Image (cartoon, rainbow, N blue to C red):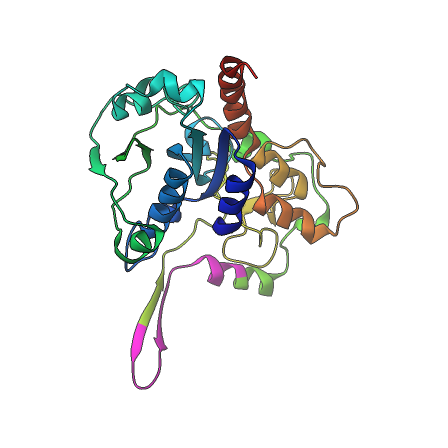
Amino acid sequence: MWWQIRDTLEAKKPKFVLLENVDRLLKSPAKQRGRDFGVILACFNDLEYSVEWRVINAADYGFAQRRRRIFIFAYKNNTNYYNDIKKEKLENIIHKNGFFIKQFNIENKMNGKEYDFKYTDIYDVSEHFKLDFKNAGIMKNGKIYTEEVIPVEIKSITLNQIIQKDGVDEKYLLTDEDNLKKWTILKGAKDIIRKKGTPHEYHFREGAIAFPDPLDRSARTMLTSEGSLNRSTHVIEDPKSKCYRILTPVETERINGFPDNWTDTGMPHNFRYFCMGNALVVGLIEKMGMRLNEIFEKEGN
């Protein structure tokens, strides 16, 4: 979708842009690490934007899900925000007065590297650029600075704090012994010999996932397959029945910070899980929204 986003930026010329994606964006593709993110930065640069980014795990800042995503904040080079920080050292923007630090505190260890961002055109970036991007950084004035930052963690909400404890519908309980065996296999460690062509063989390996999920920790990252017979689906021990069960739609809403029954709009039951697997942790966005309001007030229009 990047090229549609890029076309929108060129046509609409917004002063500020906030984007979100999976954190592997920084490392793709495997054969040319950092190329894809480099292309994005070059497009922003050509459109006269500077860019800050941070990979944020929601659980590190007190929320109920270990969901790690990259957030990208871009701003035009003629904004008041840019003028306020244009003379700052790049590492100071990350640690002192940039977009993310105001709401998502990090340890004061500046251990990053600065690079010249030189290229002929986007094709040149696509063909030749590679860089070991870290989980935070900034692109400004022909320079890229990137650093592996460490969050100052806030105790996260646990599953035990958000699950329904007064009993749930029996359809969520896993009482069938044959079905439980399937769950055990899905959640267990694997070392399977597979063939890729003939006669090449390789080992497919997976580590075990906790079964059931511990209630004294925050939830794992929810996927769109949540609620189905799937390795990634959360399975907990129900506090009332003591049976294993899957999460209810209400519990998945709470994991993302939505109000109870926010997805109870008449959509099919499995769509409620799909919706929450696709959702953002809304508390993170609320924090970013408060920071944006501060920035907008200084823009004056």
- 213 vs 200: above or below: above
Give me the residue at 67% from left, 50% from top.
Answer: 172
- 244 vs 240: above or below: below
- For the record, the magenta segment spans 183-202
Quick one: quadrant of the C terminus? Answer: top right
Residue 90 is situated, as x and y percent measured from the top left of the image, at 27, 26
Q: Nearer the viewer, residue 48 or 69?
A: 48
Quarter where residue 261 is shown: top right
Report if residue 147 is visible in the image.
Answer: no
- Picture mark count: 0
Report if residue 44 is visible in the image.
Answer: yes
Give me the residue at 52% from left, 45% from top.
Answer: 5
Residue 152 is situated, as x and y percent measured from the top left of the image, at 35, 23
Q: Is residue 70 left or right of residue 284?
A: left
Q: Nearer the viewer, residue 47 or 245?
A: 47
- 242 vs 204: above or below: above
